Amino acid sequence: MDTLIRFMEEKDIPVVVYNDRRILGQSLGDETLKNELNENPFAYYFIMENLDNSAFLGHVSVWVDSPMAQILNIYVVPEMQTHGLGSVLMDFVLEFLKAHEVSTLTLEVRQTNLSAQSFYKKYGFVKVAIRKQYYENGEDADLMLKNL
């Protein structure tokens, strides 16, 4: 499948909010995302689409404050997981960050999300700390770090 990864636009907010809630269980919401897109100079939000029909396939968002960056969210819609699209998205964001002279990348992941942890480890992320009660439901997060 051919994919297109492009900058997120305001028109994409409803589909991102919907999928954030469906996949992650929470979302920043419409207003915060609109503010992120228009007001935050550190924020970069991307959408992955099917090149043939523009169907939403995934999303990645990062805050970049070189030489550091943080992945806020990265996911592929459940219907399209296990097709290598997560790797396409991660490879894209890593190249984007290298071009922005980022040398240290972090992210948080639920301690119960073993498949995501395995995916991140494949890319060289290592667990460096635990963020207690990080998620809205009180679940802890593992803070993971990768040197680029």
Image (cartoon, rainbow, N blue to C red):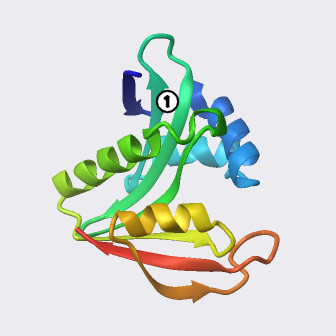
Q: Secondary structure at mark 1?
A: loop
Residue at the far top: name it. Answer: 52
Q: Position of residue 8 (x, y in %)?
A: 47, 34
Seen in the picture, residue 123 relative to 134 is either above or below; the reply is above
**Residue for point 78% across, 69% down:** 136
Instruction: Name the quadrant of the N terminus.
Output: top left
Q: Is residue 59 left or right of residue 122?
A: right
**Residue for point 46% across, 32% down:** 48
**Residue for point 55% across, 20% down:** 55
Q: Position of residue 27 (x, y in %)?
A: 70, 51
Total labels drawn: 1
Q: Amino acid at mark 1?
A: Glu
Q: Which residue is mark 1?
A: 9
Which is more toward the observer, 17 or 52? 52
Seen in the picture, residue 129 relative to 100 is either above or below; the reply is below
Which is more toward the observer, 59 or 76? 76
Residue at the far front: name it. Answer: 82
**Residue for point 25% across, 66% down:** 66
Rate crowding at label 1 as few (under 14), some (14 to 19) or many (20 or more) other CA atoms within 10 Å: some
Seen in the picture, residue 132 relative to 17 is either above or below; the reply is below
Q: Position of residue 5 (x, y in %)?
A: 38, 31
Q: Position of residue 99 (x, y in %)?
A: 17, 52
Which quadrant of the view contains residue 148? bottom left
Q: Is residue 131 left or right of residue 42?
A: right
